[in-house]
Image (tube, coloured by chain):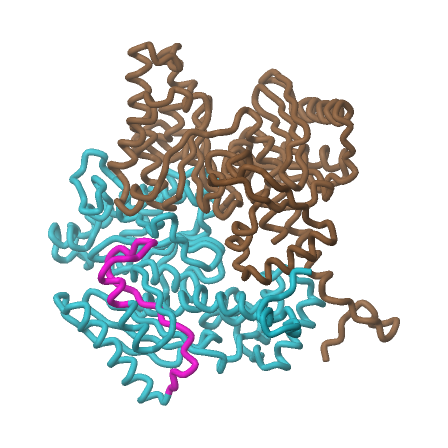
Chain colours: A brown, B cyan
Amino acid sequence: MLSALRTRGPLTRAQLAEQTNLSRATLSSIIQTLLSKQALAERRGEDPAGPGLRGRGRPVSVLTLNPAGGLALGIDLGQRRIQVTISNVAHEFVASGAIACAERTPWVRRVELALDLVDNLTTRHEISLTALAGVGVGIVGPVAADARSERVELVRETVSAWFGVPVYVDNNTRLAALAEAVWGAGSGVDSALYLRLSYGVGGGLVLGGRLFAGAGGAAGELGHISVDRDGPACPCGGRGCLERYVSLTTLQAQCSDILDARDQTARDLLADAGTRIGEVLAAACNTVNPEVVVIGGELAETGDHLFKPLEAALRRHTHSQVHRTVRVTRAALGPDAAARGGIALVLTTALSALDQEASRLCIPPRPSTSAGTGGTPSTR
Amino acid sequence: MLSALRTRGPLTRAQLAEQTNLSRATLSSIIQTLLSKQALAERRGEDPAGPGLRGRGRPVSVLTLNPAGGLALGIDLGQRRIQVTISNVAHEFVASGAIACAERTPWVRRVELALDLVDNLTTRHEISLTALAGVGVGIVGPVAADARSERVELVRETVSAWFGVPVYVDNNTRLAALAEAVWGAGSGVDSALYLRLSYGVGGGLVLGGRLFAGAGGAAGELGHISVDRDGPACPCGGRGCLERYVSLTTLQAQCSDILDARDQTARDLLADAGTRIGEVLAAACNTVNPEVVVIGGELAETGDHLFKPLEAALRRHTHSQVHRTVRVTRAALGPDAAARGGIALVLTTALSALDQEASRLCIPPRPSTSAGTGGTPSTR
């Protein structure tokens, strides 16, 4: 139950019953105990259609983890922008800020800028980080599952040394995917496929409220699905990758006003791009049959000029069982999506270890019978 | 822990520790309690490389659920063959049998034939079905997530009325995928993508030991990923679907000896088919980055003639992080794969409800304080 509230945010009792598969009576008894121990808090009179909640309906009371129970920090070390966001375990965002940086800013300097920003924010908002549970950091470029790259290690070690808490590093597009699934356009669904259309084309797959990594940490790399088997080689190792055809970089080289739909050339290019993207999404949707496809990045802001051909191609190339059930939607979060995703990573990953610790502690410790075997439970 | 043993089969203590994230000491204490209550059984001196186990190493002792704890029945109502397999909850197969049927055999008759076969097997092997926990049935054709088709209802109701236990129905290719992930070529991995190359081309996606359905129950429909955007319309609703190009039906129309690799025409067709299949698998692998791709069906029996071009195309069109981590392998199970998958469905789905019931019962019942509120725990 704690894990559901941490991962999904505020939930009504009915939503908790659904998430935990516990009977109403059992749930009610557990909730009462946790409220009395101040592990949970109850808020009344809120609209379930508000931020972080799903569905619409009359005002009801929702349960959250106790907001004083801990903080999570999200950092996005983007190409041109550094974003910092702080939330408590009740999914309330308590501070947020960003600064621009140059593309050539070295990584060490980016991390310093982010730490300065955290310092400014905590001072200004009088936030104590003593209850900080973990930090999630988004970086540009691939982060392999074993994550032993120099850059990843540098970020992890510097940030971890600074705050003395666990630090999780992942690709910032994947973190944006996670944030959309927790707080944005994919909120409350079981499976969301995210595609970001910007200067690069990336994506992420979120299943059951968690970022799905796959064997090598590259699940959701939709920008590297091939659209032309004889196309040019891509630095990713593939050939004819979608990214080569529909990135802002490529499209702007063909039409500098690509984001201005009053331009006929732009509209034609967007229609072609939409069709190609829809075909790639069709292959991805036939593979995972997600509930929702969330599309973010600057190109998504062109709206129907991109989405109509995209959805037509998606429909034309998917199994009927797939296109009957999938919903395509624009991303809902702003430029802090990846930083929020860092927070979600802490809430879903770092703190699930705490849950396990807590349930372990629920087994009453045995009294030690002798000095030599004190720590080892008897096996008889 | 019970759930891990039910889903994964026999496990060593080390494997159980890994699956449950419990400390050695805690695990040891729980195991001892469950052994004393005969919920678990311990088997010694077995080779972990044997059926149903993963990895290789010296003989060690493995834990299973008590074999007397229940039975699961798997039925495959295939196009030309009806298969029945019975297993206990310790993952031991206790009986198995099959009969041929004609493609035009009506569904009611197929179910009758399957029930007769169960009757014969239980009589011959002196098996009592009083401890039957559930039945998993594989059928040909799509089974939507809401599963309200006439055929699905017919199968479910007839089988359920006969045995008086829960009945789960799914597409038989998807059940074969699940069986490969539990007992076959994908045993012990976290993510397996299965592709079946036969008269039809189907597939399935298994994540964390469970069949991943997706929003519409069509996840893993790899046969309906498009290989030609201008290709012919497919009854699935798509266009230019892989199945149209590489099914046995299509290939045999071009070369009746397609499965005989001594034939040059067959070899050329297999190479082309392998390339197309590899390209589709590349898109699917960039989406989910699975640990293993398992390929079954008659076409897989042509070995390297198919697999070499397939793997080359897969490598050429995947992100390096993906192709560094994915392993392509032939299916390991025989024609009873789908029936075994039915059993796995019972073990992972039906019985997980029992686990929840059991853990609910671990909360000591409160003494009733009055007749009127006897069944409702106090909330104070």
**Residue visible at 34% across and 62% down?**
B176
Q: Position of residue B68 (x, y in %)?
A: 49, 82
Q: Position of residue A215 (x, y in %)?
A: 50, 48
Residue A20 can be seen, yes or no:
yes
Marks counted in the figure total 0
Task: Say which quadrant the C terminus of chain A sits in.
Answer: bottom right
Q: Read off the magenta span.
A: B127-155
Q: Is residue A247 left or right of residue A38?
A: left
User: Can you say whether A146 is above or below B302 in the image?
Assistant: above
User: Can you say whether A18 is above or below B6 in the image?
Assistant: above
Q: Is residue A148 left or right of residue B245?
A: right
Q: Position of residue A214 (x, y in %)?
A: 49, 46
User: Can you say whether A97 is above or below B308 in the image?
Assistant: above
Q: Is residue B226 left or right of residue A51?
A: left
Task: Say which quadrant the N terminus of chain A sits in.
Answer: bottom right
**Residue visible at 34% across and 54% down?**
B145
**Residue visible at 50% across and 65% down?**
B54
Does the magenta-highlighted stretch encompass residue B368? no
Does the magenta-highlighted stretch encompass residue B140? yes
Q: Quadrant of residue A71?
A: top right
User: Can you say whether A145 is above or below B334 in the image?
Assistant: above
Q: Is residue A161 left or right of residue A230?
A: right
Relative depth, front residue between A47 and A52: A47
Q: Position of residue A335 (x, y in %)?
A: 55, 24
Residue A235 can be seen, yes or no:
no
**Residue visible at 37% across and 22% down?**
A303
Relative depth, front residue between B311 and B24: B24
